[in-house]
Image (cartoon, helix red, strand yellow):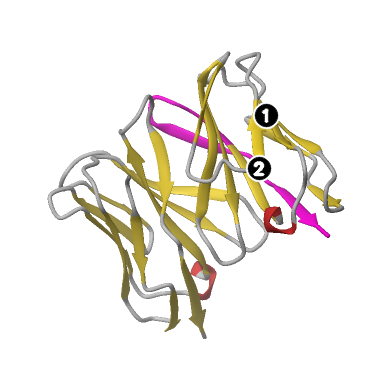
Amino acid sequence: ELKVEQNPLFLSMQEGKNYTIYCNYSTTSDRLYWYRQDPGKSLESLFVLLSNGAVKQEGRLMASLDTKARLSTLHITAAVHDLSATYFCAVVDYGGATNKLIFGTGTLLAVQP
Amino acid sequence: NAGVTQTPKFRILKIGQSMTLQCTQDMNHNYMYWYRQDPGMGLKLIYYSVGAGITDKGEVPNGYNVSRSTTEDFPLRLELAAPSQTSVYFCASSWDGGYTFGSGTRLTVV
């Protein structure tokens, strides 16, 4: 059974600082998603990483995937208050009859002015 | 193009009551999913479907039932509501690697 772990669970940062959120998963997969969720809202898709070594960037966020290490990172550069949200990684589980998206526990990011 | 539509958005149930959470998608996606999200937690897969007439259990199926009579609709049924089912429920559909989530149903069981 695929397990997905994120750390840290909570991250308080100052504006302008850099930090990285880590996403580890327990079994082989080559497809990983990053989502953002604002309080009381649904999930907003940020990145889809489809292969080993994939790197994607959008604004101050950059995501990467290492399928051999079963690790993805979400790097935040020069954080701003608008990035405050909960960030989830989700990994496709290919076991069973169909592909299923399994989520990590999330990282609550609070960017302080 | 509405995407994935969930109704209702909010509901309060008494213990032991039953209800159906509705989910409809207009993208002709074969795959559909139900997740629950407890406060401060990630999403847990309840049930999923690979097409009309085919459903299977996810990580946390106990206390729920689903059906899939059409490609568009994937309702989630709670037969005997319990306080442990207080959560936010998300429906999603997918095709070829892209996942679309509904806006969620916030359910409170008292």
Please, is residue A68 above or below residue B94 in the view? below
Horizontal side of residue B108 vs B85, given as left or right: right
Q: Which residue is mark 2?
A: B63
- Residue at position x 69%, y 29% from top? B75
The residue nearer to you, when weighing A95 against A36, is: A95
**In the image, what residue type sits under mark 2?**
Gly
In magenta, the rendered stretch is B92-110
Q: Which residue is mark 1?
A: B2
Q: Position of residue B44 (x, y in %)?
A: 51, 49
Q: Position of residue B16 (x, y in %)?
A: 83, 47
Q: Which mark is residue A37?
A: none
- Residue at position x 65%, y 38% from top? B64
SS label for mark 1: loop
The residue nearer to you, when weighing B18 against A54, is: B18
Count of numbered marks: 2
Q: Main secondary structure of the magenta part?
A: strand
